[in-house]
Amino acid sequence: MSVGSLYQYFPNKAAILFRIQRDEWRQTTDLLRTILEDASKPPLDRLRALVHAFICSECEEAAVRAALDDAAPLYRDAPEAEEARAAGDRVIEAFMRDVLPDASDATRELAGDLVMTTMSTVGKEFSEESLSAADISAYADAMADMFCAYLGNHGLGRRPGR
């Protein structure tokens, strides 16, 4: 059954969409945490894995996201939305401290914001097209390369063992 069908036949559509959105927030935060906190892998490998997983997820969930975007004004400011954003921010902040330990707080904050905003905004737009798995992988590789170059320019690439 599609989200559209579910949405059509239930009277409390906003509640259904809110629950779906809440689950999506939780999954995204878990994805961030699982990949970025895996200290067994070098930071840039973790970032590359995150970009691939995120872009693939965006492409798989494009139809659901359209329905959720329609209802977004109803729950955008809900406490659960704030909690999800805060949890994601904490994961990114910790990762940026790991990736850029010698950078200033302002530099790490900017880097984290640029990576996440770019990934989510570009990922959303990219996922609206019908693409092959090879195209998705190539796009994710290019985006990961861009992020790795950016972080390398801020000190990661100059540190031994990174």
Image: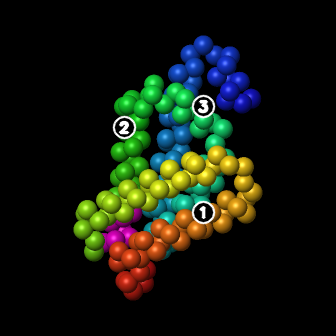
Query: Could you say which quadrant of the image residue 141 lies in?
Result: bottom right
Which residue is denoted by mark 2 in the rendering? Answer: 82
Query: Which secondary structure lies at badge 1?
Result: helix
Is residue 65 in the magenta section?
Answer: no
Distance of label 3 from label 1 (alpha carbons): 25 Å
Residue at the spot 49% in from the left edge and 42% down from the top edge:
26
Distance of label 2 from label 3 (alpha carbons): 20 Å
Which residue is denoted by mark 3 in the rendering? Answer: 67
Q: Position of residue 17 (x, y in %)?
A: 56, 27
For the residue marked with disc 3, what is the amino acid? Ala
- The answer to whether one can see residue 57 in this image is no
143 relative to 112 in the view: left or right: right
Helix, strand or loop: magenta stretch: helix
Which residue is denoted by mark 1 in the rendering? Answer: 140
Q: What's drawn in magenta, residue-wise?
A: 94-101
Query: Which secondary structure lies at badge 2?
Result: helix
Query: Which secondary structure lies at badge 3?
Result: helix
Distance of label 1 from label 2 (alpha carbons): 28 Å
Quadrant where the C terminus sits is bottom left
Are discs 2 and 3 less than 8 Å apart at CB?
no
Lower sequence index among marks 1 and 2? 2
